[in-house]
Amino acid sequence: METSYILTFIGDDRPGLVEQLSTVIESNRGNWHESRLSQLGGKFAGLILVSLPPGGGARLEEELKALSASGLSVRVTPAGSAAAPGAGRAITLTVIGPDRLGIVREISRALAQCQVNVVEMDSHVTSAAMSGEMIFQARIDAEIPASLELDDLHDRLDEIANHMTLEIDLEKAG
């Protein structure tokens, strides 16, 4: 029975980095299942879910750590068991507004207080076309508990939006 691992890595962005990782994974008879890879601040970082034959994690980690000479930092972590489908409902939040300190903290605090589980979040800051003002944008996929009224969450997010001059849209996913 194969064992699943999550590889996390960060290194200087350059051509061939993904090829290096995939070569080591394949040479250890690993199967690349899922990944989230991205350029961030001049670095290239990612998460990769792989499966390996039993006992293969230590050797894979050793070979990946040998890539540190090329500036790559890698960690291999055994994956947990797949989460059982929750009784919650899927939602998507989109956020846009002037960039300022505390946006992610305020929104994540409201979500945590309502027991909302963030499943995936993508964010970035861009320059507005006409004014050059820095604009924060985010998309958050989450799961809300069945007991939570969507209107209650919407009201909390509206308070944040009004206070921080943001537009926060909440949609049921699917």
Image (spheres, rainbow, N blue to C red):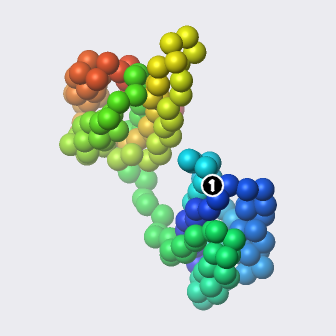
Residue at (25%, 41%) from the top-left corner? 109
Q: Is residue 173 visible?
A: no
Q: Position of residue 121 (x, y in %)?
A: 46, 42
Name the residue nearer the viewer: 163 or 152.
163
Q: Along the line of sight, which residue is nearer the eye, 155 or 18?
A: 18
Q: Position of residue 128 (x, y in %)?
A: 53, 18
Left or right placement of residue 115 versus residue 137 in this view? left
Q: Vertical placement of 131 versus 17: above or below?
A: above
Q: Nearer the viewer, residue 30 or 146?
A: 30
Q: For the point 73% across and 56% down, which residue is it?
A: 14
Label 1: state its secondary structure: strand
Query: As rendered, which of 32 and 107 lies closer to the eye?
Result: 107
Which x, y percent locates residue 98? Answer: 40, 22
Q: Quadrant of the N terminus?
A: bottom right
Q: Which residue is mark 1?
A: 44
The amino acid type of the residue labelled 1 equals Phe
- Which residue shows up at 46% across the image and 70% down it? 80
* Residue sitting farthest toward the top: 130
x and y, in percent, of residue 8 in the image: 55, 65
Q: Is residue 132 left or right of residue 22?
A: left
